[in-house]
Each structure stands twice: as structure tokens, then as C-alpha cells.
Amino acid sequence: MTDRKYSLGIDIGGTNTVFGLIDSCGHIIKKNSILTNSNKAPELLFKNIFNKIKLWETELNLQNFIKDIGVGVPNGDYFTGMVINPPNLGKGWDDLNLVSLIKSFKNIPVTITNDANAAALGEKSYGVAKSMNDVVVITLGTGLGSGIIVNNNLVYGYDGFAGELGHLVIEPDGRDCGCGRKGCLEMYVSAKGLDYTVQEYRKEYQDNKFLQSIKSQTIDGKLLDIAFDNGEKIVKDIYKYTGNMLGLGLAQIAKILSPEAFVFYGGLSNAKHRILDFAKDSMNANRSKYQKNKIKILLSDLPDGEAGILGASCLNSFNQ
Amino acid sequence: MTDRKYSLGIDIGGTNTVFGLIDSCGHIIKKNSILTNSNKAPELLFKNIFNKIKLWETELNLQNFIKDIGVGVPNGDYFTGMVINPPNLGKGWDDLNLVSLIKSFKNIPVTITNDANAAALGEKSYGVAKSMNDVVVITLGTGLGSGIIVNNNLVYGYDGFAGELGHLVIEPDGRDCGCGRKGCLEMYVSAKGLDYTVQEYRKEYQDNKFLQSIKSQTIDGKLLDIAFDNGEKIVKDIYKYTGNMLGLGLAQIAKILSPEAFVFYGGLSNAKHRILDFAKDSMNANRSKYQKNKIKILLSDLPDGEAGILGASCLNSFNQ
């Protein structure tokens, strides 16, 4: 019955919530993934999490073994502890004081941030960005999220809303975005954006056998990757278009921040070099001759789902 | 003959170089402005500066009264002490180890940065951005320069080239820029950009009396301001266009950094509300409904030419 003190890192997603016990060196002692069920009351999710932790207490034969809790959650506000209008979460999550809610379960230090910031902190603390002071971590999931590290610190901006890279406008008068604007980066570079592109190509190339063979609205990325590897030209075109659009966005970000690297993770990043090589070419083509080929394009090397809980576990101790 | 220790702040511009002795509270003890004469050897400029300082030594009856030197210079690299390919300076300034050169005159700590960063540091230390941790300072001169403060620190990026806001692309396939790209912000919002716009309007509105009355290639901003105040519609249109383009750029920057304020200084900022009100409207129109009307648009309140030397004087002591 030693009092070992771990951090509890929680990464709340639209579908699943991952949580884990993490020691001060970034070792994941215990980890679990449960359904978020975000249409039910948020209390329920935390009831399930803390029930699981009681089981861990018995298994590990430890008491009071959690020293603090860090949470990555869509639209989580580091400064206020609130969650406001989170994409992909149910109504019960809007205008929610998440820090208070969690403290009602366990009254220890609790810090929240948005999910992309948590992942960025994970990459910075334990991943491919470990030695980097200036790096931008981009999540290519349903949407496009990002966490920015500058001078070794997360960038929150004045109000906690820095890093909205998915809403950089890369094509004025382009595709309508849910934010009310047109031509936002995530309308081209994300699972959602890729779906849109495939639909457009399908309309334009009605005779293309491969495209007509895809029936579902939501595109299976793995299917496209295999087709790309098999030399399917239309998929190469689609990935090139997607990579070009990403590169336009990266060039804009690079002009503002000049980071050492862009690090990618999330579902669409599984396409790897198939999209990112085009993105790199496009980024470099859109920079001045003095600035070409300077910035690394990297893939996360952390196991799936770990960047978020590792980063969340650092939130209470990370220097801000 | 007391040993009072001041910082020497130097702000090198294409035409003039301003330098001053500054105490640790930001009081300017002595100040002077001389021609940069950048087509002559850089040594000559510093010979003139240090000759003047010898006179100050006598006037103030002090010895060894400079503890360190900070310099703001176009394309000055904070990390290497080099000046590389600086716009508006002569060939002798390209590939120049400026720190070594200055140390050959006076072997005390010397730090350089680019001119826009120095001005940002001046605003942050002694100007309108004094209480701000997250602020973007934009110089509207011949071009458009910027210095970015995030988490209370200047943003250099990995290689010292962060803050190239003048080269954000706001109109793909727009005006050709010297950087090799098209549609860069400074091709619309700067003295150069305004010239371009006036020429375009002059071609389009060949019967417009006011436009035809402007004969010179380089536009007199004061003349336009007066015409604007007198209700000259074509000038209002030109300023609205310029402000709209600026607002597009500000909205992009805001999505990445979410600063407390944008602070403007430099020649074109003398147009004040005449351009900046349009810019504010355009910025807000290009943000999501949750992010409108949050960011302040401010004018520098430091006397002309002082932001640069004040900021430069802080370079050796500012926490980085």
C-alpha cells in the first residue's frame, strides 16, 4: 500500500474516450478506452471512468495514487475550465464546467485543454517532437485540429482560441464550412474534406470505374490507400489535390510561426507519404526561395490514441 | 564621473538610422537620427554613431556608460547575429556579421533582431501593448513587417524567420510579389501596395478628376487622408479596399494566434481609422460567430521612431 502518485490523463473524443494512469516519466501504467456516449449526461462518462479506477486501485494494491487529472476535450478552455459548443459531442457537453464536474468526483488538481493541444503536448513531451521548441501538431481526423508549441510552450492566445488552423481560408469563395466562412482548410484536408473531394470527382468523372465502385458516403481511407499503391490514377489525383491544399495551409502557417516541424496524427494521416509528400512539395513551392525545404513533415510515432492521454497527463505540471 | 550604465538602442532603416541611450526604465537619455547611407560601407555608419557617442560622453560627463547594445535591422537574425539579403539596404549589408562588426567598435554584449521585432518589443515594454502577453505588432511602411509576442515572448520560430506576415497569401493569383509568390498581403497593405492600388484605380477610372490630379508615382498619404476627410468617394473606395485586404490577413493571423490586439505603426498607419475601421470590419466578418469583435485594433502611442530604439535597448535583457 505505497502512495505512488500518478497522473490521470483523459482524452475525450466524439466516439471513444481513452484514459490512462501515467507516471512522471511518461510510462502508461494502465489504460482503457470506453464509449463516450456523448448524448447521455457527461456525469455518466466520469462515473464509468472512476469505477474503472477503483478496480485499478485493487489490482495495483495502491491508495490515493492519483495526484492530478488532465483532460483533452473538443473546445476545452484551459483558462476557464469550460467546454463550449464542442463539435461532435452531444448537447450536455455545451456550456459545461468540466473542471467542477470532475472535481465533484475527485477533488484534486484538474486542468483541461482542447484535444488537439493535449495531443501536441504528448508529442512534445514523449513523441517525435520531444527535442523541439517550435512545432505544430496537426490532427487529421473528421476535422483538422492543431496544437502549437512556440518557445517550448503551448500557444493559447489571449482567450484560449489560438490554433484554429482548420479554419484558415485557403480558397476564397471555396467550399462552405460550418464556421460560416468559405474555403477553410479542413473542408479539403480531413476525413470530411476527403469525402467532399471524392464526391466532386465522382460527379466529374462519371465513367471512372473505381470511383463508381465506391458506394458509401463515408470513404474508407484504407481502400483509397490500397488503390493508390496499386497505381489507381484517379486516387493519385485526389491525394495530390488534398496534399496541395494542405501544403497551401502549411505555407501560410510557416510564414507566421516558422516551426521546426509539422507533426501529423489521426485517421487521415494513415495515408502517410501518399498525401504528405504532395503537401511537402506544395508547401515548399509556396515559400520564398530562402525558406524552401527547411521545415520537416513528420508522422507521430506514438501508438494510436496515446498522444492525447500522455499530453493530458502533463497539463498540471507543464510550464505555462 | 559616475559609471551609470545605459543600453544603446539602434534602429537601422533604409533611409535613416535612429539610435539612443536608454536607461533601465525606458527613459531616452539621448537620441539622434542620421542617414544610413546604406550604399556605403556599414563600418561608416557605426563610425558616425560611435563618434556621436563620444560627444555624449563629454556632455554627460560619464565614462563606460553603455552596458550593452541592441539593434533592430531589416532581416537581422537574432540567433546568428547575421544580416542576410536585407530589403532596402545596399549590397554591403548582405551576408554581414553585424554583431562582430559592432563588437570591433565596442566589445560589450551586442544582440540584433529584425526591425519589426525590435519595434514589437518596444511596444510590449513601453508602449500600448505594455500589459499584453499575446500581441502582434504590424509595421505599415514601404512593406508590411511584423513582430509577434506569444506567452510574453518574441516569436522567432526555429530559424528566426517567424512573423513574415507581409507574405501571407490573401489573394491566390493576385498581384506579383518580390518573394516570387502572388497575392501577398504587403502587395495590398503597405505604401507599395497603396501605390499599386491607386495606379489600378487610375487606369479603371480614367475620368476621375481627383485620381488624374495625382501625378507622381509614389502617393502622398497625407494628400489621400485629406481627400478622404473631404468626402472624396474614390479615396474612400481605395481605403476600403486596402482595409478589407488587411482584415482578410488579420483574420488568418487571428485564427492561428488569437492575440489580445493588433498594434499598428509606420507611415501608412497615419491614415489611422480611415483604413483601420474597414480592416476591423473585414477581420470580424471573416471570423466565426464566436470569435467576432474580440481582438483590439490599436495604434502605437510611442513618439515616431522611438519604438525601434526602445525595443532594441531591451534585447539583451529580455527573457527568451
Image: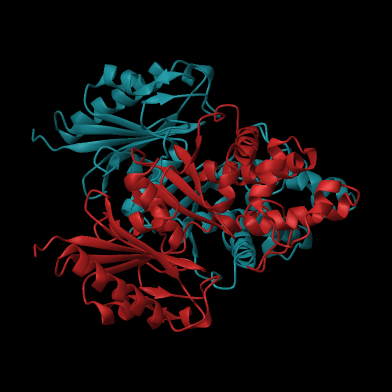
Chain colours: A red, B cyan
| Residue B255 at x, y percent in the picture | 54, 58
In the foreground, A31 or B238 = A31
Q: How many tags in the picture?
A: 0
Q: What residue is at 14 percent from the left and 33 percent from the top?
A: B61
For residue A222, say whether it is visible.
yes
Q: Quadrant of residue A276?
A: top right
On-image quarter of the N terminus of chain A: bottom left
Q: Is residue A138 left or right of residue B193?
A: left
Decide: is A105 above or below A192. Answer: below
Q: Which residue reaches farthest front? A: A59
Left or right of B204 on screen, residue A37? left
Any part of residue B30 in sight: no
Q: Residue at x 87, y 51 (%)?
A: A204
Against B103, residue A88 (above or below) is below
Indicate the position of residue A296 as horizontal and vertical percent values.
49, 34
Nearer to us in this view, A214 or A295:
A214
Which of the 4 quarters of the picture holds residue B5? top left
Q: Give the x, y percent position of residue B153.
A: 34, 48
User: In the displayed structure, would residue A38 be above or below residue B249?
Assistant: below
Q: Which quadrant: the C terminus of chain A?
A: bottom left
